[in-house]
Image (cartoon, rainbow, N blue to C red):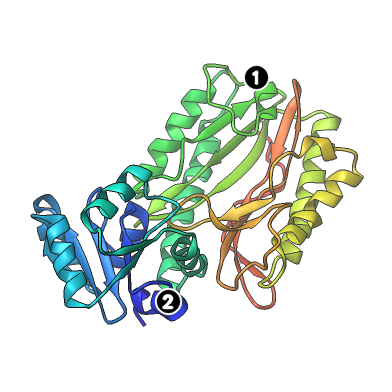
């Protein structure tokens, strides 16, 4: 089945669907661009895209008819009439009010469905990765891990957080990254207590943790990993906290499988950190889905009460952050299977000291 066929297999809330977001347009057509509109009916889909991208679209897109967009609204109306459609579902999570008003003004006789039904259906599809998607994710992760191996040779006393981040980025592009998954996080010393801090000109000092959270994009798919290492020898408290975080992550990896409730998986790791006396120092969720976006459904969070899908790729990233002192986060990401999970992250997790 094509992805359009899979969509209409689970969605019947309108005669057709209008897909305007860059990410979902690429998901359904394989076409990367900053423009274009997909209109899909149960029996056929169309990509309307302007002259700048038309040649590439005709060479790339296989599951939709490619039409050069010259008078977009008029062309869409012709397709609606051709297929006898009277209702259109839109992506409620991404379409702006201004865009919806424009469509409703021009298509005054068409009913627009702007509840969450289409966005929910697309999220459900994207949550379950097929083998091609998994291959792209594995490649993205292999790029990130190759960069990790090399960055360990670069990190030393006196280099700055920003210098490490820039080198990590350079390495990922050198190894074939299409893009960065997000702005690379590199923190050291007391700065590691800020879960999403920004790399600064602070120099690494001996006896400090260095936390690196980063990822690569390959053919539209993201990787995500975090490693915390130490330059020199950690003190007793640093080693203790590192071991607690690692124990919490290992417990969650052992529990992770298709069907587990997201909040229950989060609790598996959180309980270990709570019992160790650091519960108030773990303020974020255990994990999130990863795919064409760095954060997508499903989630492993205290408030996510739905089962995690077989075939979903989710992060497992417990952390402890002690304000003004240091923080530790260890992050892998895994494919959920019926009987457990397959860990896509191969980099060492025993505490590395440089």
Q: Quadrant of residue 131?
A: bottom left
Q: Is residue 58 visible?
A: no
Relative to 137, is 154 above or below? above
| Residue 247 visible at all | yes
Q: Residue 12's mark?
A: 2
Q: Quadrant of residue 24?
A: bottom left
Q: Secondary structure at mark 2?
A: loop
Q: Residue at x 55, y 31 (%)?
A: 186
In 3D space, how far apart are the residues under numbered discs 2 and 1 (Cα atoms)?
59 Å
Task: Indicate the position of residue 232 as horizontal and vertical percent values.
Answer: 70, 28
Dot 2 or dot 1, earlier in sequence:
2
Q: Secondary structure at mark 1?
A: loop
**Viewport quadrant of the N terminus:** bottom left
Residue at the spot 43% in from the left edge and 59% down from the top edge? 139
Quarter of the C terminus within the rendering: top right
Residue 290 rendering spot, x and y as whole percentages: 52, 56
Q: Looking at the image, which residue sits at the far front? A: 109
The local crowd at label 2, few if under 14, some if 14 to 19, many if 20 or more residues have their Cα within 10 Å, is some
* Label 2 vs label 1, nearer the camera: 2
222, 81: nearer the viewer: 81
Where is mark 1, residue-wise?
A: 205
Residue 147 position, x and y percent, is: 47, 44
Q: Nearer the viewer, residue 319 or 175?
A: 319
Q: In percent of the image, x 77 and y 61: which residue is there?
A: 264
């Amino acid at each position: 089945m094509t992805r359009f066929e899979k969509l209409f297999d689970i969605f019947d809330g309108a005669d057709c669907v209008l897909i305007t977001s860059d990410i979902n347009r690429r998901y359904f057509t394989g076409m990367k661009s900053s423009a274009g509109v997909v209109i899909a009916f149960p029996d056929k889909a169309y990509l309307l895209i302007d002259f700048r991208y038309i040649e590439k679209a005709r060479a790339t897109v296989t599951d939709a008819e490619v039409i050069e967009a010259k008078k977009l609204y008029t062309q869409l109306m012709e397709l609606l009439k051709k297929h006898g459609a009277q209702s259109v579902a839109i992506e409620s999570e991404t379409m702006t009010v201004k865009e919806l008003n424009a469509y409703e003004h021009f298509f005054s006789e068409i009913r627009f469905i702007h509840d969450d039904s289409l966005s929910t259906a697309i999220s459900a599809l994207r949550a379950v990765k097929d083998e091609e998607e998994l291959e792209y994710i594995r490649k993205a992760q292999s790029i990130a891990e190759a960069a990790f191996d090399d960055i360990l040779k670069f990190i030393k006393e006196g280099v700055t957080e920003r210098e490490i981040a820039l080198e990590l980025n350079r390495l990922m592009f050198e190894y074939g990254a299409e893009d960065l998954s997000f702005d690379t996080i590199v923190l050291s010393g007391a700065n590691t207590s800020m879960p999403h801090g920004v790399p600064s000109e602070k120099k690494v000092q001996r006896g400090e943790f260095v936390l690196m959270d980063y990822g690569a994009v390959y053919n539209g798919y993201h990787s995500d990993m975090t490693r915390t290492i130490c330059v020199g020898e950690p003190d007793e408290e640093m080693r203790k906290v590192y071991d607690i975080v690692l124990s919490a992550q290992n417990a969650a990896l052992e529990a992770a499988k298709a069907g587990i409730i997201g909040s229950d998986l989060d609790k598996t790791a959180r309980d270990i950190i709570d019992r160790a006396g650091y519960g108030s120092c773990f303020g974020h969720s255990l994990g999130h889905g990863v795919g064409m976006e760095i954060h997508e459904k499903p989630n492993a969070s205290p408030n996510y009460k739905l089962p995690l899908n077989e075939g979903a790729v989710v992060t497992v990233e417990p952390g402890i952050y002690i304000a003004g002192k240091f923080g530790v986060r260890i992050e892998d990401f895994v494919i959920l299977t019926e009987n457990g999970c397959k860990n896509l992250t191969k980099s060492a997790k025993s505490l590395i000291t440089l």
